[in-house]
Amino acid sequence: MSLKRIAAVVLTGALALTGAACGGDSDNSGGTGKTFEAGTTMDRLSKAQKIIIGTKFDQPLFGLKGLDGKPAGFDVEIGKIIASELGIPADKIEWTETKSAVREEYIEQGKADIVVATYTINDTRKQRIAFAGPYYVAGQDIMVRKDDASITGPDSFKDGTKKVCSVTGSTPAKKIEEYVKDKTTQIVLFGGYAQCVEALKTSQVDAVTTDNVILLGFVDQDPNALKILGAPFTQEPYGIGVKKDDTKFRAFINDTLEKIYADGRYAKAWSDTVGDVAPAPTGPAVNRY
C-alpha cells in the first residue's frame, strides 16, 4: 500500500473516532432517537427504557385486565402514547393497578411514574400530586338494574330507602353524600367497581354511581341486566397524575396531549376502545397551571 493510501486510511479512522466521541458527548437519547434535557424525568425514563404506569384493572373500556394479564382500554392507550413519545415501546411498560384509594400514594412513593386511571382533577388531590390534562371530561351518572324504574336521579336517594355503591377514595363516592339521607347506611363502598356491579346484580344495593363512561362499560358487558340513567349531574375532568413538583414532566405530557389531539392518535385511541358505545370526544384544553 502506498504512503498516500496509508495516510488516507489513518485520517478516515481518526475522523470516525472523533465523530463518535462528539456524538457520545451530545447525544442524550440513550439510543432511542429521543433527546431530552439532562436530569429530567423524561431523560431518566427514556434512557432506562422502562416506565411504570398506574391504571385501573377493573373498568371496561378504560382499564380492564384481560386474560393475557395485560390491561386494555382508553386510559391504557393514552399511557402507551406517552411512553412512545419518550421512545419507550409498549412491551417495556410495566402496568400496575392503581385503585382510587391509592393513586396519590403510588405517585408520591414512586410506585408509578404516571397514573392514567379515570383520575378526576380536583384541588384536594393537587395538594399532594400534580395533573397533566385534562384529556377527557366525564360526568357522574347512576347505573341500576334493567327492570328498576324507581331511581330517576340522585334525588331518589333522599328518602333514605335506597342503597348506592361506589368506590373508596373516589370523587363520585364523596359527591353522592350530598344526596343521601344517611351516608352510613345508604352508601356502600368497595375497593373496585366490579364489586359494586356484583352487589347491584344480587340486589345488595340499588344503584352504582361513578362516571358515565365507566358505567357504560359495565352496561356494554351485560345490557340485559343493567342500564345507565343517562343524566350526568357533575363534570369530571380526567387528568394524568405525576409528582407534585415535576413541572417539566407535566409540561411534556401536556405537549403530548395537544399533539395527539391534532395528529389523530387521540381519536384513534378512543375509536379502538370506547368507540362502539360512545361518540368520540373533542380533546379538552389542557390546564397549564
Image: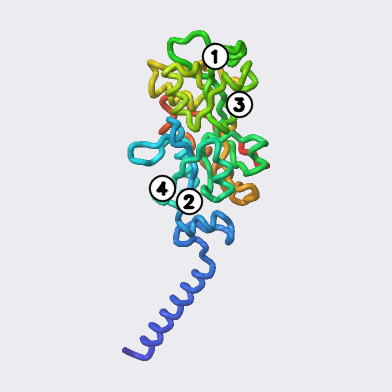
**N-terminal of the two: label 4 or label 3?**
4
User: Label for residue 34?
Assistant: none
| 92 is higher (above) or lower (below) than 161 | below
**N-terminal of the two: label 4 or label 2?**
2
Determine the secondary structure under disc 2.
strand
Asked if the residue at tag 1 contacts the one at tag 4, i.e. Cβ–Cβ closer than 8 Å, the answer is no
- The crowd level at tag 4 (other Cα within 10 Å; few <14, some 14-19, many 20+) is some
Q: CA distance from mark 4 to mark 2?
A: 10 Å
**N-terminal of the two: label 4 or label 1?**
4
Determine the secondary structure under disc 3.
loop
Q: Which residue is mark 2?
A: 51
Asked if the residue at tag 3 contacts the one at tag 1, i.e. Cβ–Cβ closer than 8 Å, the answer is no
In the displayed orientation, state which residue is furthest to the left.
1
Image coordinates of residue 144 in percent, x first then y, are 48, 16
Image coordinates of residue 7 in percent, x first then y, are 40, 87
Q: Which residue is mark 3?
A: 235
| 268 is higher (above) or lower (below) than 42 | above
**Amino acid beneath label 3:** Gln
Q: Which residue is mark 1?
A: 162
Q: CA distance from mark 4 to mark 3?
A: 31 Å
User: Label for residue 90?
Assistant: 4
Closer to the camera: disc 4 or disc 2? 2
Q: CA distance from mark 1 to mark 3?
A: 24 Å
**Amino acid beneath label 1:** Lys
- The crowd level at tag 3 (other Cα within 10 Å; few <14, some 14-19, many 20+) is few
Is residue 265 in sight in this rendering?
no
Is residue 108 in sight in this rendering?
yes
In the displayed orientation, state which residue is furthest to the top.
149
Q: Quadrant of the N terminus?
A: bottom left
Closer to the camera: disc 4 or disc 1? 1
In the rendered structure, the answer to whether residue 241 lies left or right of residue 95 reads right
